[in-house]
Image (cartoon, grey):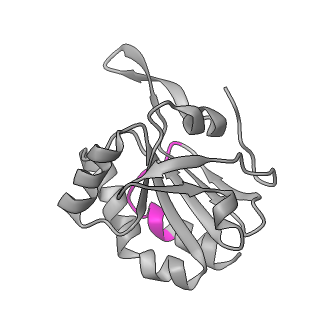
């Protein structure tokens, strides 16, 4: 498993996004990037996380930061998820799992004694030069968006 640590260069990414667009790390040079990984669109925790980041999206923009949520869901599902909950963040589709692998968020999980592979809820704060400045793993949703905003404002 890949382990991304603070102070290293962020792995490049190229994602299809909601609304039939694309986003790349190279295309965001000069901005900070909040890259948050979540297991599955339109589930309770993932919806709350998307709503929390969306509520702060203007403050992130004021800090020159772009917020991108990444899951392995198809773009069409992300479009429905975003419209249903009026989310304001960019949603990236990593259907093939390349970005999840690069960031080490495709992990073995356990639920009720059953083991399976899934996306770890994790967040990476990348600075304007493309360096990872903060890493949050095994994220608890409550209060997380505020913690990330505070860190982004300090960059």
Of 102 and 79, nearer the camera is 79
Q: Is residue 7 above or below residue 97?
A: below
Instruction: State the residue at coordinates (44%, 34%).
Output: 95
Q: Viewed as shown, does residue 152 lie left or right of 92?
A: right
**Residue 60 picture location, percent across and down:** 52, 77
Instruction: State the residue at coordinates (49%, 30%).
Output: 96
Main SS of the magenta part reads: loop
Q: Is residue 116 above or below residue 43?
A: above
User: Which residue extends farthest bottom?
Assistant: 62
Instruction: State the residue at coordinates (53%, 27%).
Output: 107
Name the quadrant containing residue 32. Answer: bottom right
**Residue 15 picture location, percent across and down:** 52, 48
Whether residue 143 appears in magenta in the rendering, the answer is yes
Instruction: State the residue at coordinates (81%, 50%).
Output: 8
Q: Is residue 108 above or below residue 65?
A: above
**Residue 47 picture location, percent across and down:** 28, 54
Of 45 and 83, nearer the camera is 83
Q: Viewed as shown, does residue 74 lie left or right of 15?
A: left
Identify the magenta region: 138-146
Of 142 and 98, nearer the camera is 98
Q: Viewed as shown, does residue 71 lie left or right of 136?
A: left
**Which quadrant of the figure contains the C terminus?**
bottom right
**Which quadrant of the figure contains the N terminus?**
top right
User: Which residue extends farthest top?
Assistant: 114
Whether residue 145 appears in magenta in the rendering, the answer is yes
């Amino acid at each position: 498993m890949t382990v991304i640590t603070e102070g290293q260069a962020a792995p490049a990414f190229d994602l299809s996004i909601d609304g039939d667009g694309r986003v790349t790390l190279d295309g965001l040079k000069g901005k900070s990037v909040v890259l948050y990984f979540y297991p599955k669109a339109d589930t309770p925790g993932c919806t709350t996380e998307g709503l929390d980041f969306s509520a702060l999206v203007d403050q992130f923009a004021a800090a020159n930061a772009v917020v991108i949520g990444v899951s392995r869901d198809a773009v069409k599902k992300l479009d429905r998820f975003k419209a249903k909950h009026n989310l304001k963040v960019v949603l990236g589709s990593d259907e093939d799992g390349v970005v999840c692998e690069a960031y080490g968020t495709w992990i073995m999980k356990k639920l009720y004694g059953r083991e399976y592979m899934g996306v770890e809820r994790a967040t990476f704060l990348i600075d304007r030069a493309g360096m990872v400045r903060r890493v949050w793993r095994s994220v608890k949703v409550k209060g997380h968006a505020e913690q990330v905003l505070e860190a982004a404002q300090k960059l």
